[in-house]
Image (cartoon, rainbow, N blue to C red):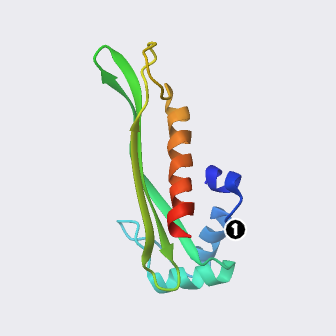
Amino acid sequence: LTELVIGGDLPLIEDGDFRNALDRAGATGDVQGQYDIEKVKKAAAAVGATAIIRGSVTDYQMQRFGSNDAPVVGFDVEMLDVATGTTVWRGSITRRGKSRVPVVGGGSSTLGALTQECCREVVSRLEKEAF
């Protein structure tokens, strides 16, 4: 979300505003986090949203590689067209950063820095591929 805001190219609706609209529409997620598409459409119309971007973290850890630890980050993202309820764009990323021990080569050595790099890359792909 931060990278989408920084880019400033897409009009964004605050998550809290959309969640309130979902509540007003009577939309509650099932055990798998899925919502009734008609209720989502109603909530989206109430706040003027035409698409929903959602995602899930698949990997976020410091992982041992030999005698060193390195960050590993992975997540999946998709954009849904509210009018049709279909997925119009999907992206996935998994990256391993560098260990804290100085070695030749680039890469982030913290989870935070690696997460930011991955988010920037996925937002860039979204902007190029979905629009």
Q: Nearer the viewer, residue 105 or 59?
A: 105
Q: Position of residue 41 (x, y in %)?
A: 54, 83
Image quadrant holding the N terminus, namely bottom right
Q: Which of 72 and 14 is in front in this view?
A: 72
Up-down relation of residue 46 to residue 102 (above or below): below
Q: Where is residue 31 in the image (x, y as percent from the top left)?
A: 35, 66
Q: Farthest left residue?
A: 66
> Position of 60 compared to 47: left or right?
left
Image quadrant holding the C terminus, namely bottom right
Q: What residue did someone put label 1 on? A: 11
Up-down relation of residue 100 to residue 111 (above or below): above
Q: At 57% across and 62% down in the image, what residue appears? A: 127
Q: How crowded is mark 1: few (under 14 residues within 10 Å), some or many (20 or more)?
A: few
Asked whether the viewer can see residue 62, the reply is yes
Q: Which amino acid does label 1 sit on?
A: Pro
Up-down relation of residue 7 to residue 64 (above or below): below
Q: At 42% across and 20% down in the image, what residue appears? A: 99
Q: Where is residue 80 in the image (x, y as percent from the top left)?
A: 48, 73
> Position of 63 compared to 35: left or right?
left
- Label 1 sits on a secondary structure element that is loop
Asked whether the viewer can see residue 57, the reply is no
> Position of 118 compared to 10: left or right?
left
Q: Which of 63 and 19 is in front in this view?
A: 63
Q: In which quarter of the image is residue 42?
A: bottom right
Label count reads: 1
Q: Position of residue 128 (x, y in %)?
A: 54, 62
Q: In which quarter of the image is residue 97?
A: top left
Q: At 52% across and 85% down in the image, what residue appears? A: 83
